[in-house]
Amino acid sequence: MSVVTGALGSLGPKLLQLLHGEYKLQKGVRKQVESLSRELDSIYPFLHKVSDVPWDQLDEQVKLWAHEVREASYDMEDVLDTFLVRVDGGKNNSDSSSLKLAMTKLGELFSKAKARRDIAAKIMDITKRLEEVANNRQKYKLDEIMCKPLAATSTIAATSTIDPRLKAMYKEVTQLIGVDKSSDELMSMLNTSQQDHDASDKKMKMVSVVGVGGLGKTTLARAVYDKLKSQYDCGAFVSIGRDHDLVKVFKDILFHLDSENHKDIHNTERGVELLIHQLREFLNKKRYFIVIDDVWEVRTWEAIKLALVENNHGSKVITTTRNVDVAKASGEVYKQKQLSYDDSMKLFYTSYYDLPPHLRTCLLYLSTYPEDYRIQKDSLIWKWIAEGFIDGKQGTRLFELGERYFNGLINRSLIQPVENGWNGRVESCRVHDMVLDLMLHCSFEKGCHLEHLGDLLHLRYLRIRFNGSSPELPIQLGNLKLLQTLDVEGTLPASIVHLTELVRLCADKKVPDGIGKLVSLEELRIIKGCSDKALKFLKELDSLRELRVLEFATYDGADQSMQRDFVKSLSNMQKLQHIDVYDSPWLADTAMWEAAGFVLPRPLHYLGWHAIRFSKLPSCINPSALPILAHLQLFVITMDEQDLKLLARLPALYYLDLTTESTVTASNINAGDRSFFQKLAHFVTNAMVQFEQANEGDTSISLHMWNGEDAMPFASRKGNKSRKVVPSGVMPNLQVLYFNVHLRALKYNYSDYYENIGLEYLPSLRELKGRIAHEDVPVAESDAVLAALRDACNVHPNHPTLQFCLHLLR
């Protein structure tokens, strides 16, 4: 659905539903419906042409005609939805007495017969109205008017997967808005004066362009590069991004510097060290100009900098980054300025008319939110679906298509992505105040009457929040046959199991029996207990084969019979991407689960299973079975070194919360292995941890996790006395480390542990957190521990923040 085409896009499928469904239309009505469908097919492409032209460039007669069609489409949609609800729906009646059931069925027969008569009359009215619209199109020769090239517009594919940096890199400088002044300033900083022709004794100059995402850093760097590259012996413009491979980065630089001699560089098997050496040799006697675009981390820049030779030939290097620390490490800093208001408006109207019609509609919908409001991605997509903005294609699910629309707006910098700090995924967005004006707010006071909600037959999206206590929701909700999203507080009525179009159900209370009837569900979140009959709920999950997101709590745990049902259901939900089970613990016998056929879906990226306490690590949690798992919360009672190293090889793991009752050591971890938690950024554990280098001659590292009860694995060992950060293959990207400290178990050997905790093997560490269990230990000793931890943070070059709380175990 678009601003111009209105509801036309959704009318075709509904008319086909009338023709092919069991609606027993009269013969004459069927012919009218077929004729109506053909007329719509001829109008829809013409409207798409209209939508491709900027509104202010359209002929006034075309605008009036488009308005007529749009309004007619909404009326048609209302008529069709009302008919479909009246024929399919009926009132939900939980009374099972035979007399009442018979009376109900008799009433439904009369109601459906009246609905068919009504639809016949309505279809006739719609046909006449559409004929009039078609006649006006011919009468005013609108096709001829539209043939005139009022605007040169092009449709960009909605499923955009092209890196937005590429579009900025290859845009003509004459098309760039507000870049002239910035490029002059940046060139001035580079100091490329043509008056001094003796460049041989000049030092290399490095400048970093820093600013928030979407501000135009890449565009600016490209404009300056294009202007100046002819003055140098060779040049390269390479974008790297957040998830980069340094080997590929160095190969890209070599290829762009000299594509002829390095045309096969990407087919060679060379490591980082050899590529750095090759780059230094190539650049040694050349005056070069290199742009490294979109650098996220200081250590990435430091690796690239090793290849850039200072040869006193007046070479220039530009980096672009969002990170101020990266900018400072890269040389002089140029802060990218915000565009002026006039330039901003000019730019907005240009990214807007470049959008395909469906993305324009999705963008304009965001005007319902206030400036700087954090808009949840999933909620926004479900609203787009409910409004009919997303036209599903065969083989593509609506939500996945909505994600492509969302990413398309991010790629065009029309919305600003907001990442989740725990897993690095984009889960929300913000929009500039030029786009957003106000937000509609759906908040009920206690004692309000909700019965009339059941009369809103066309409703697709319903979200209810209460101020104070949440009452029981009315049975009339079961009348909303077209509802796609139901996100509510309060007790759900039994009638909701008749909402067969529902694709998203979020509730804070238990769901009624029969949830398995909602076979279209893609998202199910139940916050406070899944059901009064958890056994039945876990069985019924077996029918929900389309689920992507499953989140629920069981307040009384789950016995072995219930766990078997859950395992069986899991085996049939192979589209799941997100699973979260919390609250009361399940004591899970891993052998029993595996005998019952326990497998996890391959698309899984979030697994929150702290409530499920496995006796040992399940075999299906392994790198080959879960290639994109990024978030893992796991409780494993008994673990060994092999288990820990298996988890460490999960290739996409970003967040790990691991609880175990075992003491585990993973030994002989080498930097060259690249197989020990390479992407992990957050590590939370109940154990005490230490990273240890056995001796200076051995470069391998060991990770100890101590439960505070077994023999201490690190009490008498010595570590790196200098505490300087040294290369290691252990968690190279770890930013947050959270662990417990058992004071009494240490038996006063505090310094042996804290002086050798091994933070120097964690080069990316930013935060050190945890709990100190201080039962039966004097306060002074707790303070001494905190002081030792603080000292360990202070000597680390990143100076990670320290946040430990005192905890009294009971």
Image: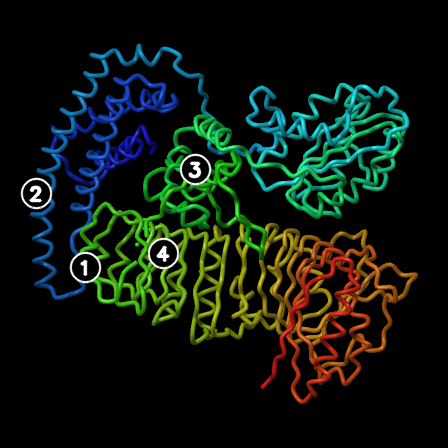
Q: Closer to the camera: disc 1 or disc 3?
A: 3
Residue at 70% in and 64% down:
644
Name the residue beneath numbered marker 4.
505
Real-space Cα separation, disc 3 to disc 4, in angstroms: 33 Å
Q: Is residue 166 visible?
A: yes
- Identify the element where label 1 is drawn: helix
Circle 3: residue type: Met
Name the residue beneath numbered marker 3.
434
Circle 1: residue type: Glu
Query: For this view, does 696 lie left or right of residue 599?
Result: right
Q: Is residue 384 visible?
A: no
Query: For this view, does 445 lie left or right of residue 357?
Result: left
Q: Closer to the camera: disc 1 or disc 4?
A: 1
Real-space Cα separation, disc 4 to disc 2, in angstroms: 33 Å
Name the residue beneath numbered marker 2.
114
- State the image coordinates of residue 639 (x, y, percent, origin top left): 67, 70
